[in-house]
Amino acid sequence: MHEKLTALSKRLKDEQRELLLAAAEQNTIPSASTIQRVAMLELNIAAIENTLADEK
C-alpha cells in the first residue's frame, strides 16, 4: 500500500505543479477555481503524507 500511496502523491504533486506553472504564465491572478484546485490538491497530498507517516 505504501507504494500505491507514494505513486498517488506523486501524481497529485505533478498536477498541482502544472496548475501553478500555468497560473504563473498568465501574469494575472489565477481564477478562483484554479486556486481551489491547488488548495484541494494540497490537502490531499498532506493527507497522504500523514497516512504514510502513520504507517512507520
Image (cartoon, helix red, strand yellow):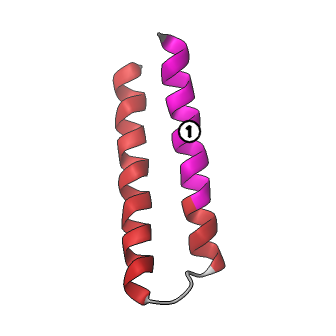
Residue at the top extreme, as displayed: 56
Q: Please name the residue shown 51% across and 89% down the image.
A: 28
Q: Is residue 54 magenta?
A: yes
Residue 52 left/right relative to 25: right
Instruction: Tell me which segment is drawn in magenta.
Output: 39-55
Q: Residue at x 44, y 59 (%)?
A: 16
Rendering coords of residue 7 (x, y %): 34, 36
Residue 2: give x, y in percent of width and height. Answer: 39, 20
What secondary structure do most residues of the magenta stretch adopt? helix
Query: Would residue 17 appear left or right of 52 to someone viewing this image?
Result: left
Question: Relative to residue 56, is residue 1 depicted above or below?
Answer: below
- Across and down, in percent, residue 33 comes to 62, 74
* Location of residue 22 (image quadrant): bottom left
Q: In the image, what residue occupies the spot 41% across and 19% down?
A: 1
Label 1 Cα crowd, 10 Å radius (few <14 / some 14-19 / many 20+)? few
Asked which quadrant contains residue 25, the reply is bottom left
State whether residue 37 is above or below residue 33: above
* Residue that numbered label 1 is attached to: 46
**Residue 47 sits above or below residue 56 on the image:** below
Q: Image height check: is 30 above or below 43?
A: below
Q: How many marks?
A: 1
- State left or right for residue 44 relative to residue 52: right
The answer to if 46 sits in the magenta stretch is yes
Seen at 55% across and 15% down, the residue is: 54
Asked which quadrant contains residue 8, the reply is top left
Please tell me whether mark 1 sits on a helix, a strand or a loop.
helix
- Residue 31: x and y in percent read 60, 81
Residue type beneath disc 1: Ala
